[in-house]
Each structure stands twice: as structure tokens, then as C-alpha cells.
Image (spheres, helix red, strand yellow):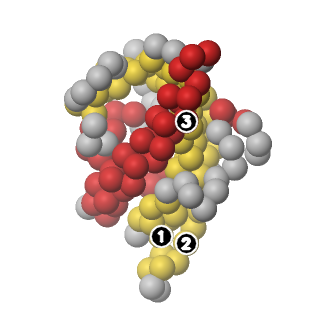
């Protein structure tokens, strides 16, 4: 998968999180935008633009604690395997793709979620997109323990 879903194949630099929970449960939880305020520290609330169960095309707005709101849309779903979103704000377009794999760590069965996040800026904002990609990776790493706590507590 090279440029599908706006993201590249994960690298060893992309963050990953291990959750001691079945892959289907982890996927269902992370694929639903309504759960984001439970684990995403920068997020104040989610405003659904489309009701119903998560599906390709579903749209919502992430109202963040600092900065402008982001309009997002699910652009790819392969249950238990892959989930992808695209978000826009100003001259930026962000792509996040989650890859799900079964994994055993220290004798514990669970799920490894590899998180590929890329931000692209248009024209003069292009260099800022690269910087924003680094910032997103840092935020994902900071949110990872909250993802684990939310899922392992279910």
C-alpha cells in the first residue's frame, strides 16, 4: 500500500500501541469517532455530521482544546485490519491510518495498532505540513497510554 488512504506504509518511526484486548474489540473502539474524547487529550468534543455506525464517508468535527476545529471523514475501513481518516483545516490535509495486528507480548495476547499520521500543506504551507506530521506523531505517543487504559478497562 503506497499512497492508498493518503498514508504510506508504516515505518519503524511511526508510533504503535499494544493493547491486551482482542483485535475486533480494539478495532471497533478506535473506528468510532464518538470514543475519541475518552483517549485523545487534545480533543474537547466530537460533533457528528453524519449519524449512525462508523462507515466510509462518515463525517465529524473534532473540537480541539487549542486551535481551530478539524472536519474529518472516514476514508477507509477494512474491519480488523485497517481504518483511515482524512481531515482538513485551512491549507492542511491530515491523513491517519491505523493498522491492526494480533500480537503476543510477555505471554499476553493482544493487538498492536500501528498509527501512520501524515499532514500535507498546500503551496506555502507545505513545510509546515512536515512539522505538523512530527507534532501529530508526538501527540499520538502521548495519547497511547490513554488508549490502552480505555480499552483494557472495558
Q: Earlier in the sequence, mark 2 or mark 1?
A: 2
Residue visible at 55% across and 72% down? Answer: 103
Residue visible at 68% across and 44% down? Answer: 8
Pair 3/2: label in front = 3
Residue visible at 57% across and 42% down? Answer: 97
Q: Position of residue 112 (x, y in %)?
A: 52, 63
Q: Secondary structure at mark 3?
A: helix
Q: Are marks 2 and 1 in contact (CB under 8 Å)?
A: yes
**In front here: 93 or 151?**
93
The residue carrying mark 1 is: 110
The residue carrying mark 3 is: 130
Q: Are marks 3 and 1 in contact (CB under 8 Å)?
A: no
Q: Position of residue 129 (x, y in %)?
A: 53, 30
Q: Position of residue 20 (x, y in %)?
A: 40, 69
Q: Position of residue 66 (x, y in %)?
A: 24, 27
Where residue 62 sits, quadrant-wise, is top left
Label 2 packing within 10 angstroms: few (<14), some (14-19), many (20+): some
The residue carrying mark 2 is: 103
Residue visible at 34% across and 33% down? Answer: 34
Q: Secondary structure at mark 1?
A: strand
In the depicted structure, whether residue 140 falls above or below residue 120:
below
Quarter that holds the C terminus:
bottom left
Q: Earlier in the sequence, mark 3 or mark 1?
A: 1
Label 3 packing within 10 angstroms: few (<14), some (14-19), many (20+): some
Q: Separation of disc 2 and disc 1 at Cα?
A: 5 Å
Q: Is residue 32 left or right of residue 66?
A: right
Q: Earlier in the sequence, mark 3 or mark 2?
A: 2
**In front here: 13 or 127?**
127
Label 1 packing within 10 angstroms: few (<14), some (14-19), many (20+): some
Q: Separation of disc 3 and disc 2 at Cα?
A: 31 Å
Q: Secondary structure at mark 2?
A: strand
Amino acid at each position: 500500500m503506497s499512497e492508498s488512504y493518503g498514508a504510506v506504509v508504516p515505518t519503524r518511526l511511526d508510533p504503535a500501541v499494544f493493547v491486551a484486548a482482542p483485535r475486533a474489540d480494539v478495532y471497533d473502539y478506535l473506528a468510532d469517532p464518538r470514543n475519541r474524547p475518552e483517549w485523545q487529550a487534545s480533543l474537547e468534543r466530537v460533533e457528528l455530521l453524519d449519524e449512525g455506525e462508523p462507515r466510509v464517508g462518515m463525517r465529524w468535527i473534532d473540537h480541539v482544546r487549542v486551535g481551530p476545529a478539524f472536519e474529518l471523514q472516514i476514508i477507509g475501513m477494512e474491519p480488523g485490519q485497517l481504518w483511515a481518516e482524512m481531515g482538513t483545516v485551512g491549507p492542511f490535509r491530515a491523513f491517519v491510518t491505523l493498522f491492526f495486528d494480533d500480537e503476543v507480548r510477555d505471554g499476553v495476547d493482544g493487538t498492536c495498532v500501528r498509527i501512520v499520521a501524515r499532514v500535507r500543506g498546500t503551496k506555502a504551507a507545505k513545510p509546515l505540513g512536515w512539522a505538523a506530521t512530527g507534532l501529530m506523531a508526538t501527540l499520538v505517543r502521548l495519547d497511547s497510554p490513554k488508549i490502552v487504559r480505555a480499552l483494557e478497562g472495558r
